[in-house]
């Protein structure tokens, strides 16, 4: 039987309003505002050190806001209720090392740590195996995670994030260790799950062409400021790429209107 959705239920957007983050004299984010909708994938772009990971950590509650607010529907980020706030997230940070004596299936199950007991319920085990199967990773289920490659670990951590059944899915450079084929496998799965489960999905990417192909919206950061936001077709231009990354670039569109960025060379620094 198909699940019936309540049409009167309000859409729970993730809204950031005038975010300012500062550590000492260093400003990490300045006056950033945006709204993310369920069922859409948003990619954060920008050069190194411009605040992309900082933004994810702030949304998750790891970094303290100096001013501004973050809301998910009618709920707001409150440091006093941080555990409650984080329960809605499936968060895959950057550079996590799986140096633990666990199998792949055990690592995936940790995505539901809040609901686990001494005995793993059959339905949770089936759910974890189903996620691995859908990603072509079922053959790794009983492998020690310490024997996996960096790319395999990245795929397993993505599976763990999905296991949480999140409302908000946040991924920091989720394809950095993956080969070309598995980059597309992960991102295709990400888009499919975002649409089907109505996740609010936010990810950091460095590959502009992957972002243009898989993201519904882009947030472009430069020196802690949000300098552009919108659909890739409308904002990803050669002028933007040159300004943000200081490289010469051309942007053309494929037969579907998706922009493709070809970088030529670094612009000389004066």
Image (cartoon, rainbow, N blue to C red):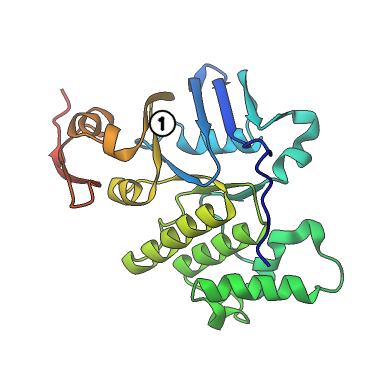
Q: Residue at x 87, y 70 (%)?
A: 118
At which x and y percent is residue 71?
65, 29
Q: Is residue 101 visible?
A: no
**Quadrant of the rendered image containing residue 252:** top left
Whole-percent x and y of residue 54? 52, 34
Report helix, strand or loop for mark 1: loop
Position of residue 16 relative to residue 253, above or below, is above
Which residue is located at x 50 percent, y 39 percent?
A: 53
Question: Circle 1 sits on which residue?
Answer: 50
Task: Please determine whether, in this image, residue 240 is positioned above or below residue 211.
Answer: above
Q: How many badges with numbers are in the image?
A: 1
Q: Residues within 10 Å of mark 1 (few under 14, many from 20)?
A: some
Q: Quadrant of residue 48?
A: top left
Residue 56's spot in the image, x, y percent? 55, 38
Vertical relation: 12 (above or below) 207: above
Residue 257 visible in the current orientation? yes
Q: Is residue 91 above or below residue 228?
A: below
Where, quadrant-wise, is the N terminus in this rendering?
Answer: bottom right
Residue at 50% x, 65% y is 155
The quarter of the image holding the C terminus is top left
Answer with the quarter of the image where residue 234 lies.
top left
- Horizontal side, residue 183 vs residue 244: left or right: right
x, y (%) of residue 168?
A: 60, 45
């Amino acid at each position: 039987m198909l699940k019936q959705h309540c049409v009167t239920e309000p859409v729970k957007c993730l809204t950031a309003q005038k975010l300012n983050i500062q550590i000492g004299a260093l400003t990490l984010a300045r006056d950033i505002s945006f709204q993310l909708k369920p069922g859409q994938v948003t990619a954060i772009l920008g050069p190194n050190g411009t605040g992309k990971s900082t933004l994810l950590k702030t949304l998750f509650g790891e970094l303290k806001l100096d001013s501004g607010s973050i809301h998910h529907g009618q709920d707001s980020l409150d440091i006093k209720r941080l555990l409650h706030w984080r329960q809605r997230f499936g968060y895959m940070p950057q550079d996590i090392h799986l140096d633990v004596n666990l199998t792949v299936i055990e690592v995936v199950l940790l995505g539901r740590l809040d609901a686990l007991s001494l005995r793993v319920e059959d339905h949770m085990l089936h759910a974890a195996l189903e996620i691995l199967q859908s990603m072509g990773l079922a053959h790794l289920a009983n492998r020690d995670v310490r024997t996996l490659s960096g790319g395999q670990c990245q795929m397993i951590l993505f599976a763990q994030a999905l296991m949480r059944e999140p409302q908000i899915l946040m991924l920091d450079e989720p394809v950095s260790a993956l080969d070309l084929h598995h980059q597309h496998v992960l991102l295709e799965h990400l888009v499919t799950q975002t649409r089907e489960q109505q996740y609010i999905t936010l990810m950091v990417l460095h590959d502009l062409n992957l972002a243009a192909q898989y993201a519904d919206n882009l947030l472009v950061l430069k020196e802690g400021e949000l300098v552009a936001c919108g659909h890739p077709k409308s904002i990803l231009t050669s002028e933007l790429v040159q300004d943000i990354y200081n490289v010469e670039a051309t942007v053309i569109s494929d037969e579907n209107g998706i922009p493709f960025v070809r970088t030529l060379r670094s612009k000389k620094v004066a």
